[in-house]
Image (cartoon, helix red, strand yellow):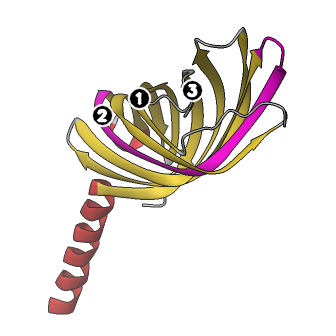
Amino acid sequence: MRKFFLAVFLCICANGFAQLIQIGPQFSTNITSVNAKSFSSDHTNTGIGAAAFARLNLALFYAQGEFGYAQTNFSVYQDGVGETKFKLAGTDASLIAGLKIVPLGKAGNVRLFVGYNWKNYSDISTSNNLNSIALERNNHSILGGVGVDVWRLTFDLRYLAGLSDIDASNSEIKTGVTNLSLGFKFL
């Protein structure tokens, strides 16, 4: 009889822990725009990403950490040189704090969140060899967005406003990324 009660107690504790901490994979697509003051024009383009996330649930609030790999694409145009397309890829990490504005229990919830994002571009390639724009490898951004959880699926729409000037020369390039992601909670 004691073993039965111990087994029931452990199941209840495991279920409570699974509700407190959730982990899983996350896949995303993004549209990157740039604020490039020293260039004639700039163009947006799409990229992709994959990450793992861990979420700590605290009643109506939650905290989430993400770590993964993301790809960003954009282009700028310089008079006399032409258009240069940039393809940046590398490590991506985010810290998020959120509020569940419509909690629906186990069925899901609607969330608002803010946070910080850091990218380290380990792979930088350009399409124009005549253009010698050196880019910084680290990009810091603040983010904000809205998310919906349905069962074990999580959908997020977020905007990342670049704080860093990623152009190492006298010019200025800051990124703005609109990101749509789909995640699956294992726990």
Q: Which residue is mark 2?
A: 98
In the picture, the disc for residue 106 is: none
- Relative to 156, 79 lies left or right: right
Write the start and end of the magenta stretch as one range. Answer: 78-101
In three-dimensional space, the C-alpha distance between marks 3 and 2, rounded to whole angstroms, equals 19 Å
Residue at position x 31%, y 57% in the image:
21
- Relative to 19, 27 lies left or right: right
Q: Nearer the viewer, mark 3 or mark 2?
A: 3
Which of marks 2 and 1 precedes in the sequence? 2
Residue type at mark 3 is Val
**Label 1: few (<14), some (14–19) or many (≥20) C-alpha neighbours in 10 Å:** many
Q: Residue 18: name its quadrant.
A: bottom left
Residue at position x 63%, y 37% in the image:
134
> Secondary structure beneath disc 1?
strand
In the picture, the disc for residue 177 is: 3
**For the stretch drawn in magenta, what is the main secondary structure?**
strand
